[in-house]
Every structure is written in structure tokens, then in C-alpha cells.
Image (spheres, rainbow, N blue to C red):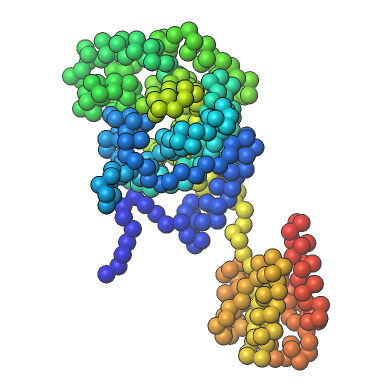
Amino acid sequence: MQYTLPKGVFDVLPEGKDWNRSDHWQYVEEIMRQTAHTYGFKEIRTPIFEKSELFIRAVGEVTDVVTKEMYTFLDKADRSLSLRPEGTAAVMRSFIENRLETINTFHKYFYIGPMFRYERPQAGRYRQFHHFGAEAIGNGSPEQDVEIIDMLWELYRRLGLQDLTILINSVGDASSRLAYKTALSKYLHVHFQELSPESQVRFSKNILRILDSKNDQDQKILEHAPSLRDYLNEECQTHFNRVLELLTKLKLPYIVNSKLVRGLDYYNKTVFEITANALGAQNAIVGGGRYDGLIADLGGPSLPSVGFATGIERVLQTMIHQKAAFPPAPHPFLFIISLGKESLDYCLTLLYQLRHLQIPSEMDFGSKKIQQSLQVANHLGATFCLIIGETELSLQKGNLKNMTSRENIEIPLSELTSYIMNLFFLSQKE
Ligand code: HAM
């Protein structure tokens, strides 16, 4: 019997060919951490599962995420737990539970980790996927919204992404939305029979979600629907205008998309997505927005907040597609080949010594022919190979081979360590 992966998940391997190569993941995660630190966000880590009621309350009882996509199970004491489908709810739970508002009223957190949604898997859509998310708690200003978007833009610039589009909208506050929902419901009521079955369900459950229906007929009907923007009250309108003004000042290219409503219920005012034109149907590399009422709704203090989460798989896929540069994979600087038993202890001592000097070094302990060992060294991408056998020991000279130029040089064993150290430090400066 051969065991295989469940549907919708994947392995990340050092030998991965493409976006699922572990050194590519490490690089992208490192740039994410560095960018977060540049903008003053600090790391928060929450558990992978939480009580189900947290997500039901925060994400929304009638959202697809809660009704169809959560991995929910009972533990041995019959408690309902769920694998986290997103990070915002958990960060807010942690913020409230740890009473972090008593330390300060302004907090900026980021997180990197796996999320779980039972969705139909396809390219760019998985059942376990990874978020780099950030949440700024305690500041309700449009400047804070723009800081979040600018941080993303800077992250994608550092990663070498191109051809991205910022889609932005305001979903207003509760009172603007109520007025809009009434107008939209009046308009769609007339077209109810022509709507797709999914939108007919959304009509009574969550009418705003009809706006981001993928059905062509629904979209045709929506062409003449009232626009959410016309129903924003003055405060929401002023907030949104200032966001757009700042984006223009920062030369961040955006498109106002009045149909962008997002699939999670906690948003108010600014919502946004960034799409990568290189990706297919699943082209949103990030989603985010403001959620001023969520913390109070979960029983915490009333603090406005804004955040985002970017899908790491989709970021990596875009980078691969656009041929963005990655640093070279980790590889040994020196590969030591010991020919015969006599030289083994000498080579091992050298290997330990170099590793303790933090010089990446490798040795194949199985006895092999010199050509086979050179092949292994080549495969691992070693910069140099050192060959030492009985002859080299008796002559007290090692044979150092440059694996790129294929040049060989003889080095007295007494000078070997300092010679390799020099070579290594010079290579680090290049
Ligand atoms: P979201 O739009 O549900 O937002 O997810 C954010 C991003 O995660 C998406 O734009 C996409 O890149 C990626 N993503 C979502 N589902 C999948 C999947 N099944 N497979 C691969 N990638 C996926 C949130 O989760 C909010 N918590 C964002 C947020 C933070 N809003 C405020 N703060």
C-alpha cells in the first residue's frame, strides 16, 4: 500500500522544481518578515485551531468560509474546534484575551502560517494554504489604510513582482450599508427569477455578496444596479476620498471597483484586493480592509483596525511565472572527498573544524570512487572540492578543485584551513 497526500495539499521540498521549493519559501518568508519590521509590525503566533464559535462570530455565520469551508471537528471532550480558515479572528481573540490594549492602544502585528479551507482545489486554490497577514489595531485613520497598502506594494517590489493591480472600494459603515441593501434589494427583486441559483440564495442571506458573483447573467443584471458608493454617508465618503488621494500621492496605481465586497463579514469602509495579471482565475494575491467593529463584537474594547492577508502560494507562483530572481539555493562551499581509510580521520577533523567556523561543508561518508564523489559534489552545487587520499597525506598536500573553472591547486595541509577560510570570506563579499 502506498500512502498519498489528501486532496488539495502539497509538500514543500528542497528538491521542489517550482514554487514548492523550500529555499524559495524561506526567501519569500524572510522578505515578508523584513518588510513587516520596516513598517513597525511585530510577529504574533496563534494556534492552528481555535474554538469554532470564534470563527462563526468573527467571519460571519452565513459566509461560504463558515458554512462550507471550515474543517470543524469534536475533540475527545466533545468541544467543537476548527482549523483556522484565516488569521484575523484569532489575532483579535488573542489581543482581547491577553488584554493587550492595557499595554498600549496602538498595535501592529504580523503572522505567517498555514490556513485551512475545504474548497474545490485548482491551480492557486488549496485546502491548506499559507498567509502572510498583518493587522494594525487602534487607528481609524485613512492614513493607516494607506500604510497597509503601501507596505504590500513595497513587499511585492522587493520580491520583484510586476503587473499588479490594486482594486479598492468602500463598503461604508452599518448605516450606509443598510440604506444600500434596501436599494439593492428593491432593484434585484425585479430580476430575482433571472439570477443564478447561488445569487438567489444570497439574496436573502447576504445580498451584498451577489455583487461579486462570477455568473455572467448576474453581472449583466448588476450593470444597472445602484452603486454602493452613492450610499456612503459623509464620513465614509471623506475617509474613502482621503485614501484615494494618498494612494495617488504615493503613485500607487489603483482602480475603484464598486462591486468589490469581499467574502468575510467583518469589513467596513476600505476594502481592497491586489490581483496579479499573470495568474488565472485565482488571481487575487491579497485581500484586506478595515474592520472597525470586530474587536468590540468579540467582547473587547472598541478599537478600529485594518489589515490584509496575502496568499504565499500565489505570490510564489506569480514570481515563478514572471521569472523573478531568487537567491541561490543553500549549497556546500567545500565538499571533502576522502580516498581510502587512511585519510578518513584527517578529513573528518577538517570537516568538523570548518563547520565550527560556519563554513558550509559536506562529506559523503560512504566510500565511493572519485568520479562518483565528484558527481555528488556537483549535484549539491559545491563551490570547491578537496580531495585527500594516502598520497596527499604522505606529501602533506591537499588537492583543491574549483568546481566552476575545474582548475586544481595543491595546498600544503598546514595552510589548508586558513586558505579555505580566506576563500570563503572573499566569496561572501562578492
Ligand atoms: P481572504 O481574501 O479570504 O482574506 O484571503 C486572503 C488571500 O489568501 C487571498 O487573496 C488569496 O491570495 C489567499 N487565499 C485564500 N484562500 C486560498 C486558498 N484556498 N488557496 C490559496 N490561497 C488562498 C482573509 O483571509 C482576511 N483574513 C484578510 C484580512 C486580514 N483582512 C483584514 N485583515
Residue in view at x 74 percent, y 89 percent: 393
Residue in view at x 39 percent, y 12 percent: 176
- Quarter of the C terminus within the rendering: bottom right
Q: Nearer the viewer, residue 319 or 308?
A: 308
Residue in view at x 39 percent, y 21 percent: 259
Q: Is residue 354 visible?
A: yes
Above or below: residue 149 compared with residue 397? above
Q: Position of residue 62 (x, y in %)?
A: 28, 29
- Where does ligand 1 appear, by image quarter? top left
The quadrant holding residue 409 is: bottom right
Q: Position of residue 127 (x, y in %)?
A: 35, 46
Above or below: residue 216 compared with residue 386? above
Give the residue furthest to the top: 234
| Total marks placed | 0
Q: Is residue 271 visible?
A: no
Q: Position of residue 42 (x, y in %)?
A: 58, 39
Q: Nearer the viewer, residue 9 or 375?
A: 9
Residue in view at x 30 percent, y 67 percent: 2
Q: Is residue 344 left or right of residue 218?
A: right
Above or below: residue 327 compared with residue 308? below
Q: Is residue 367 left or right of residue 282?
A: right
Give the residue furthest to the left: 193
- Quarter of the N terminus within the rendering: bottom left
Q: Position of residue 342 (x, y in %)?
A: 66, 91
